[in-house]
Amino acid sequence: METKTVRALKDWKQLFAITLSALLVAAPAHAVVTTSGTPAALHDETDGDAEADRQAVSREIERFRSSSISLSQAMAIAEARHAGATTADVSFDGASGVPVYRVKTLHNDRIWRHTINAATGELIGGEAALPLGELDTEDRNNLAALGAIRHRLADAVRVAERAASGKAISGGLVRERGRLNFAIVVISGDDLKEVILEPPGARTKQR
């Protein structure tokens, strides 16, 4: 369920990873940073488009910083469309004429896709729903696990923003070594930081 924006951000060479052992139940100051460094996927050789990609991401970040609506607010707006909905994936998209957030929420065995204006918070173009049965096996398993844990992506975003001292520009689900994690990309100063959080209990539930 990774978006084009997230892929572009992850390909930018300034991005580095922070892995937290658990989502915080108490204060964010109690988080422990267990690993730090550049993800292995970022060690690939650069190609002729590297500079163009870097400039595109720089423009994306500038548009994000000038937006009135935060990623957390966009998530709340999308979730409010359906009582009990929870966000599965969210990312900022500044490549189009109007900067927007693309939010996918889970509700009643359907994935709802929302486009939120990053300047006004208004919903653009209505909603689109996709039954979970039409997703591939990995996505269905990830979303089933999301519904089984008590922490939400919104919680992960708050933790990541505190841990990385910045503002989140995207967030979603990833599975590593059979465990479901939240992956949040945060803009901190001039850096992009990817924060990986494992919800408490997710390790045992994924076995």
Image (cartoon, grey):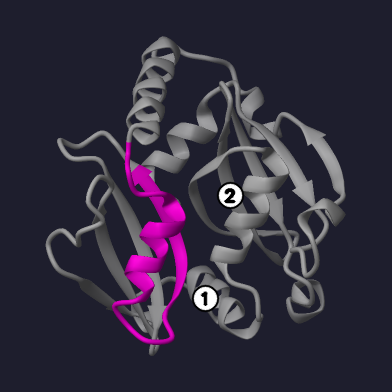
The reply to whether residue 183 is in sight is yes
Q: Name which residue type carries label 2.
A: Ile
- Please identify the quadrant where the C terminus is shown: bottom right
Vertical placement of 25 versus 6: above or below? below
Horizontal arrangement in the rendering, residue 150 relative to residue 202 (left or right): left
Badge 1: residue crowd in 10 Å (few <14, some 14–19, many ≥20): some
Residue 73 on the magenta segment = yes
* Magenta residues, start to end: 67-92
Task: Sort mark 2 into few (<14), some (14-19) or many (20+) by Cα contacts within 10 Å.
Answer: many
The answer to whether residue 141 is above or below residue 195 is: below
Query: Where residue 143 is drawn, which disc sits there?
Result: 1
| Vertical placement of residue 158 versus 52, above or below | below
Residue 195 position within the rendered picture, expressed as x and y whole percent measured from the top left = 67, 46
Which of the two marks, 1 or 2, is nearer to us in this view? 2
Rendered image quadrant of residue 53: top left
Q: Is residue 202 above or below residue 173?
A: below
Q: Residue at x 53, y 41 (%)?
A: 167
Task: Give how far across and how far down residue 121 sits, in percent.
Answer: 26, 56
